[in-house]
Image (cartoon, grey):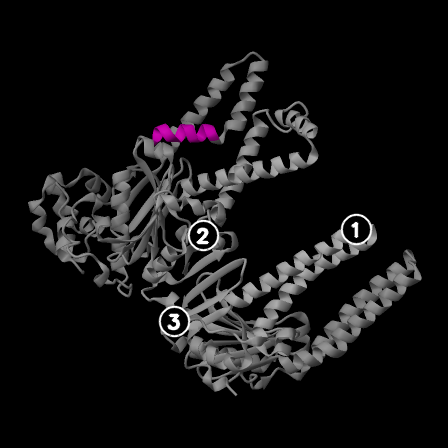
């Protein structure tokens, strides 16, 4: 018996957003490399190494990671539990009974707002047991938060 | 309300009749009995005045009281200690200028400061709060609601003990600052501790009070000051011979390092120091004459002897007379310990979620272990000992104590092994760590043409195999009716027992290599202790089963 992955995918726009983040990181590296090339003019070996590094970063963060993350990042909300899966090299699945949920936070960064996305963080009494869903469609996130708050309010106990 | 006879007697302590009626209600609530004392107003008339002045004074409600005047002896000494560097500077500056009275003035100032602190510090007991007020111009009042009291710790330093005093720390929660009453008499402190803990316990009905474990006839001596301790059953009592585990235990080593640090600082300041003309430099010359190897050996042996002595000393200072008792009425465990500074601390059974049995390497080799508690909402006291249940002791004693505390024979339960893939991973990981120094040795042998060095590469590899074997040997877990037992590690081997009802979630982690090996790490997330108790490298086909044992009823819907 093993756990199946959670049912729901995050928004496909999240894939684009992660790729844009990769492009931005590559751009920063390119500018840094360009400055070094112009002012320091290092040995050819260093130049080649730099080019190789930037290529690897570009391929990794723009072409590969967003696709993998989109496949891995999943979530599911049922009547009595929250289930999330995230990660890239290390995949982490977390399940928390709703009766143990303490707070539900929504977070929208600048880029997330541009893409109409939200991150939802569900915390429990364990400082190391928070569940995070990144790249949710904003309306879906609002629905999730609403459902969670309604159910948590209805459940008894102090969630410890 | 388990023993009304005792509490009623307690409510009769006020000898002054006239005012007893007026303030009867308040008094009844402050005194250790509970609500039903209010009805016993008539019985109050039958007061026996010899009941103990300490209790009468401390439970008198609403009156601001000062701490023991004997603290006037302690405060100035403490103040002088705190301002010592400044004082020395003042005295030195004064003496070069020929004005010695500066030093006298500074000392007098320090003493006056201490007296002022005593005058401006007051405390009182209101019906439902303990309050402490201090400050001259801006007064600060700290209040602790009595029904929220979680811990009452009594500490007595050497100075305090010489004067028959103690410091009481009343804690109401993890996030809040403890209320400190520094300077009650020992009797007052002991009585206050018993009263507060029992009353806090009664104010919280859901607390687990296991009457069955209380010794029979425990409500007889309630009126005495020491009554609080008569309901306690001793769970663990340190045998002085167990000091032999001190050099192998972590606390002993830490204490040794701390003492060493203080010692070296002291040496520095006393002018003996490590300087050019100091003793140490002279010693170094002599050592050079003997020869480098002898010197290294001597230093090593000297350091070893020093560490052993310091570890023994640290163990003695911290753990002398260590006693773990269960107070069934108060629903808590009590620890008392210490050679010079004595400490009495408590731990609520309600907050206990399990225990950790530590068998770190040097300690395990000599058959020792130590026990710590997994609790919620207990902040570390800064000495890293708030959760210590036993100091390093013989393994059987520790396991027995753990069984007593948990109320279940857990260490007899056979642990489930994690299968071939998990065992393989223990070896590969240990060998990967050993390969680095081995490779370095081989490279070094090639560079300097020293074949002997290359042969030495076998050593880290052998150590890697031994470590892998040991880790594979100890890895395991078990699930019982109430607990999850996990055991892992080798050098830092620990067996963790966590109550399953404390689980707030489950985490399944798979690294790239774990996915390839078909294993996963399943952790129990909890609010207590480390917050995360992992079962490492469980075979994939058992993940669902363990997860549904950790949070029963919620996992089945997510299984394949």
- Element at label 1: loop
Of A28 and A63, the residue lying toward us: A63
Residue that mark 3 sits on: B501
Q: Distance between the residues labelled 1 and 3?
A: 60 Å
Q: Position of residue B90 (x, y in %)?
A: 54, 22
* Residue under the point 52% across and 67% down: B473
Q: Is residue A152 above or below residue B474?
A: below
Q: Which of marks 3 and 2 is nearer the N terminus?
A: 2
Secondary element at image label 2: loop
Pinpoint the chain carrying mark 2.
B
**The quarter of the displayed image where residue B212 is located:** bottom left
Measured as percent of width and height from the top left, residue B458 is found at 69, 58
**Within the magenta stretch, is there residue B75?**
yes
Q: Is residue B253 visible?
A: yes
Specify whether disc 1 shares its chain with disc 3: yes
Q: How far is disc 2 from disc 1 in space, using C-alphas?
A: 51 Å
Residue at the location (71% across, 59% down)? Answer: B436
Q: CB atoms at circles 1 and 3 under 8 Å apart?
A: no
Can residue A159 be seen in this snapshot? Answer: no
Q: Is residue B513 above or below residue B147?
A: below
Q: Earlier in the sequence, mark 2 or mark 1?
A: 2
Q: Identify the residue under disc 2.
A: B380
What's the CA distance linking mark 3 and mark 2? 23 Å
Question: What range is drawn magenta here?
Answer: B71-81
Q: Which chain carries label 3?
A: B
The subunit letter for the residue under badge 1 reads: B
Badge 1: few (under 14), some or many (20 or more) residues near its Cα, within 10 Å? few
Left or right of residue B217, residue B139 in this image: right
Q: Quadrant of the C terminus of chain A?
A: bottom left
What's the residue at 59%, 25% (across, down)? B272
């Amino acid at each position: 018996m093993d756990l199946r992955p959670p049912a729901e995918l995050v928004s496909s726009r999240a894939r684009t957003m992660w790729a844009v983040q990769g492009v931005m990181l590559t751009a920063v590296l390119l500018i840094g490399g360009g400055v070094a090339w112009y002012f320091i003019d290092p040995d050819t070996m260093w130049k080649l190494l730099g080019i190789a590094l930037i290529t690897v970063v570009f391929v990794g963060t723009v072409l590969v990671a967003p696709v993998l993350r989109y496949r891995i990042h999943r979530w599911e909300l049922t009547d009595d539990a929250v289930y999330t899966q995230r990660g890239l090299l290390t995949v982490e699945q977390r399940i928390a009974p709703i009766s143990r949920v303490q707070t539900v936070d929504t977070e929208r960064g600048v880029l997330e707002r541009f893409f109409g996305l939200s991150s939802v963080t569900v915390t429990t009494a364990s400082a190391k047991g928070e569940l995070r869903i990144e790249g949710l469609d904003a309306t879906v996130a609002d629905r999730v938060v609403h459902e969670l708050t309604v159910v948590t309010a209805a459940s008894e106990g102090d969630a410890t | 309300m388990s023993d009304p006879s005792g509490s009623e007697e307690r409510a009769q302590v006020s000898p002054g009749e006239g005012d007893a009626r007026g303030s009867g209600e308040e008094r009844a609530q402050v005194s250790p009995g509970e609500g039903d004392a209010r009805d016993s107003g008539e019985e109050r008339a039958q007061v026996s005045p010899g009941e103990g002045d300490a209790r009468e004074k401390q439970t008198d409600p609403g009156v601001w009281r000062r701490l023991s005047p004997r603290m006037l002896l302690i405060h100035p000494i403490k103040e002088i200690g705190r301002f010592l560097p400044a004082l020395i500077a003042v005295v030195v500056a004064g003496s070069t200028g020929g004005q010695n009275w500066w030093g006298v003035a500074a000392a007098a100032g320090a003493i006056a400061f201490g007296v002022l602190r005593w005058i401006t510090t007051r405390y009182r007991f209101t019906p439902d709060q303990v309050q402490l007020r201090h400050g001259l111009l801006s007064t600060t009042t700290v209040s602790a609601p009595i029904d929220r009291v979680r811990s009452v710790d009594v500490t007595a330093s050497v100075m305090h003990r010489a004067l028959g005093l103690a410091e009481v720390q009343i804690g109401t929660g993890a996030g809040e600052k403890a209320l400190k009453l520094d300077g009650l008499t020992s009797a007052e402190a002991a009585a206050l501790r018993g009263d507060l803990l029992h009353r806090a316990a009664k104010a919280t009905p859901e607390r687990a009070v296991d009457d069955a474990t209380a010794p029979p006839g425990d409500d007889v001596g309630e009126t005495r000051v020491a009554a609080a301790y008569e309901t306690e059953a001793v769970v663990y009592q340190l045998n002085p011979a167990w000091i032999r585990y001190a050099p192998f235990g972590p606390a002993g080593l830490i204490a040794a390092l701390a003492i060493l640090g203080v010692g070296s600082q002291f040496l520095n300041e006393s002018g003996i120091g490590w300087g050019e003309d100091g003793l140490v430099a002279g010693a170094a010359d002599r050592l050079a004459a003997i020869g480098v190897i002898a010197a290294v050996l001597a230093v090593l042996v000297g350091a070893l002897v020093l560490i052993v002595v310091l570890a023994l000393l640290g163990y003695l200072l911290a753990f002398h007379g260590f006693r773990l008792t269960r107070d069934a009425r108060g629903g808590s465990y009590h620890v008392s310990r210490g050679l010079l500074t004595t400490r009495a601390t408590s731990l609520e059974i309600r907050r206990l979620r399990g225990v950790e049995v530590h068998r770190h390497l040097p300690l395990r080799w000599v058959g020792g272990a130590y026990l710590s508690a997994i609790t919620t909402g207990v902040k570390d006291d800064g000495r890293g000992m708030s959760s210590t249940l036993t100091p390093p002791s013989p393994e059987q004693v520790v396991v027995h104590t753990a069984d007593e505390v948990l109320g279940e024979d857990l260490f007899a339960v056979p642990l489930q092994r994690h299968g071939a893939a998990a065992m393989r991973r223990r070896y590969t990981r240990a060998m990967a760590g050993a390969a680095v120094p081995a490779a370095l040795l081989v490279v070094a042998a090639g560079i300097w043409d020293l074949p002997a060095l290359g042969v030495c590469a076998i050593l880290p590899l052998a150590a890697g195999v031994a470590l892998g074997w040991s880790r594979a040997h100890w890895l395991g877990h078990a699930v019982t009716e109430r607990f999850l037992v996990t055991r892992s590690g080798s050098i830092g081997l620990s067996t963790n027992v966590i109550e399953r009802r404390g689980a707030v979630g489950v985490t399944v982690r798979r690294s790239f290599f774990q996915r390839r090996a078909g294993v996963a790490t399943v952790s129990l997330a909890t609010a207590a202790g480390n917050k995360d108790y992992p079962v490492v490298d469980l075979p994939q086909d058992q993940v669902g089963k363990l997860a549904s044992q950790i949070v029963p009823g919620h996992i089945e819907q997510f299984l394949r």
